[in-house]
Image (spheres, rainbow, N blue to C red):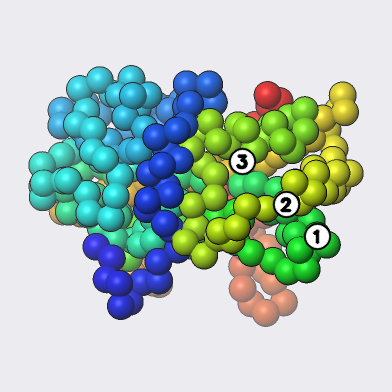
Amino acid sequence: MRLPSETPQLTDPTALSAHRRRADIGAARFLHDEAMSELHERLIDVNRRFTSPAIVTAFPKIWREFLPDARIVASGEVLDLEAGAHDLVIHAMALHWADDPIGQIVQCQRALRPDGLFLGVSFGGETLHELRAALGQAETQIMGGLSPRVAPMAEIRDMGGLLQRAGLSLPVADSLRKTVTYRNAIALIHDLRAMGETNALIARHRAIPPRALFLEMAAIYAEAYPAEENRIQATFELVFLTGWSPHESQQKPLRPGAATTRLADALKVTEYIAPTGASFDETANPVHDRSDDKGQ
């Protein structure tokens, strides 16, 4: 739960609610569909039947399709979740607007039964980095300064750390980057309006921006981030979070130095000894990055 004295308020809830009410998510739901597809694969991998799921989302119409029997909970500062009532809680495409994301995950964790599963998906730090750069350059040139126009989004490592801070076991964070192409930057902004993802920052510039700002931004964008067929590219990063409510049956990590088998022997690879005496396995890949480029 957010304490105003401790957590700065970044999001204007009134503006965010208005944007979501005006959203035409049915016309721009492809990222939600991608998130659902990825979550479906994770649930298959878990291989468990969940009998009391809940989904926290600002878009109930489309997320109700994902798990028809799930309890739909509106996203907000305080979540309408009963302690210990669910064996699965999904926080869907809303965490990136939360002023207190760890508070959101803590509330989900408390709603889980022992050995219950938390899944989260939201936009990550790579999202719209092209638009952020183009807008910043255009605003500096046209208005002589910068104002917040694209919401800051957390990096995957920071988001993964929230799982442990919230008291979840076996935490995993991974991401999926999608490159989407548009006719121009204005078409991208129209899509963001349809998604309900336009500027709702509390520190945003309240005056109506001059038309020249967006024309200059579109020109800068087209030159800096071109795609084939005279289009532009936009990056969206979906970050997926997975954690379990603690239970005595879950595997526990060994204390340092307690291992009896070398990793290199288990993987049947040659261990490389670095000059400092540290060792690493050249086949290891500690960062899981899944890329799937697709034009829209």
The kind of residue tagged 2 is: Pro
Callout 3 environment at 10 Å: few (<14), some (14 to 19), or many (20+)?
A: some
- Secondary structure type for disc 1: helix
- Residue 25 point in image, percent of width and height: 47, 27
Q: Amino acid at mark 3?
A: Phe
Do residues under tags 1 and 2 come within 8 Å of each other at their CB atoms? Answer: yes
- Mark 2, Cα crowd under 10 Å, few <14 / some 14-19 / many 20+, is few
The reply to whether callout 2 and callout 3 are in contact (CB within 8 Å) is no
Q: Point out the tag, 1 or 2, that comes first from the N-terminus.
A: 1
Q: Residues within 10 Å of mark 1 (few under 14, many from 20)?
A: some
Disc 2, SS? loop
> What residue sits right under mark 1 in the picture?
142
Residue 222 rendering spot, x and y as whole percentages:
84, 40
Judge by depth and name the residue closer to the eye, 268 or 152.
152
Is 147 in front, or is 277?
147
Q: CA distance from mark 1 to mark 2?
A: 9 Å
- Provide the secondary structure element on which disc 3 rests: strand
Q: Nearer the viewer, mark 3 or mark 1?
A: 1
For the point 11% across and 46% down, the residue is 82
Please tell me how many numbered marks the rendered image carries: 3
**In the shown orientation, is residue 185 left or right of residue 284?**
right
> Which residue is found at the position 19% from the left and 31% from the top?
71
Can you identify the residue that label 3 sits on?
A: 236
Residue located beneath label 2 in the image: 210
Residue plotted at (69% across, 71% down): 274
Depth-wise, is mark 1 or mark 2 nearer the camera? 2
Q: Amino acid at mark 1?
A: Ile
